Image (tube, rainbow, N blue to C red):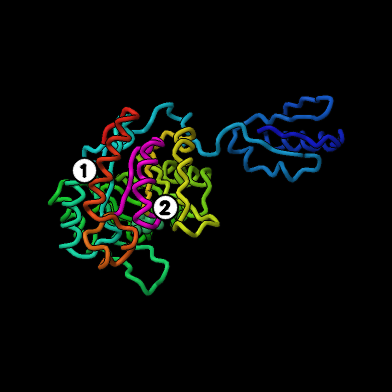
Amino acid sequence: MIIICKPEATDEQIGHIEDAIRTWGLKPHTSRGVERTIIGVIGPEDLIREKPLAAFPGVASVTPVMKPYKLTSYDFTHKRTVIDVGGVKIGDQKKVVLISGPCSVESREQILEIAKIVKKAGATVLRGGAFKPRTSPYTFQGLGIEGLKLLAEARAATGLPVITELMDTKDVEVVEQYADIIQIGARNMQNFSLLKEVGRCKKPAMLKRGMAATIKDVLLSAEYILSEGNMNVMLCERGIRTFETYTRNTLDLSAVPAFKKESHLPVIVDPTHGAGHRELIPTMALAAVAAGADGIMVEVHNDPEAALSDGEQAMLPDKFEALVAQMRAVAAAIGKTI
Ligand code: PEP
Ligand code: MN
């Protein structure tokens, strides 16, 4: 930790800071410049971080020298994490994984039909919500455990591993039993009890960015999962709230290189919830591939007019197939395959 003192800091104030550092069992290393005094605090960074250094008179700023997210940081591994989900490798530098399916599991016929459609189009992971985080309590809340069972049927029928959202700590066992990847939704990104539970799971997790979460917030939420032992975490950019209302959210594609610079974890982009309108999704999906995403998650529905959630943003099967062909071309341009 580096403390920069105010230009007007007195010797007494500097001495007081140094004394406090010593009483905490840490070591001050003071360098007196012409303009300012800088104090380096030597000792375990976690211990130092807890101390209210900024509260001391004469302190201008306090800067950590290490990242607060340790296990999540790229420096921890110096190599990219590759997550194997039933043979599908997520984070492989030469591959872009396609995750697709409906917003919600609605019925056996619906999920089986859409699973076959997205598989044929090139998806290698099936998505579908059984526990749905809906803004209104009066809208469809998902089929719950029944939905999980239907996802398992769709997996058996197609061979596609499935990703589905866990909303509540009470459902962790049942979701882990049925899901191949446990999704933490945007609304729960900072539900720290839920994150810790997922950290104790054996199945990989996908952490979606909260609507008002900074890059650092997302990385610290991932740290909650990793610090409990689950190292198989992927991060998902799904758009953030801005002043713009034309789109449902503003898809922050700069999050892709930012997450990759800061972390070793694979990065997925969800242009569906980011854009919120089906005409905008293909362009953003192509841009996400070009930006270096390890995976793209797109909602597809065979009958969007009858969808129980997010029908307006679901792509039609033929349009999705056409998009996959374009995504393959973009991927090839940057030395990857889909
Ligand atoms: C979803 O992917 O089903 C979903 C609800 O997304 P988000 O949490 O990003 O809103
Ligand atoms: Mn949705």
Residue 155 percent across, percent down from the top left: 17, 51
Q: Looking at the picture, does residue 160 appear above or below residue 174?
A: above
Q: Residues within 10 Å of mark 1 (few under 14, many from 20)?
A: some
Query: Which segment is the magenta one?
Result: 273-299
Q: Name the residue beneath numbered marker 1.
A: 122
Question: Which residue lies at the image location 52% right of the left edge and 56% below the top edge?
Answer: 244
Using the image as rendered, state which of residue 134 and residue 316 is in the foreground. Answer: 316
Question: Which residue lies at the image location 47% right of the left edge and 41% below the top edge?
Answer: 255
Q: Name the residue beneath numbered marker 2.
A: 274
Residue 289: in magenta span: yes
Examine the rendering and report whether any part of residue 71 can be seen.
no
Disc on the earlier residue, 2 or 1: 1
Residue 111: in magenta span: no
- Ligand 2's quadrant: bottom left
Name the element at disc 2.
helix
Residue 37 percent across, percent down from the top left: 79, 29
Q: Quadrant of residue 94?
A: top left
Q: Amino acid at mark 2?
A: Gly
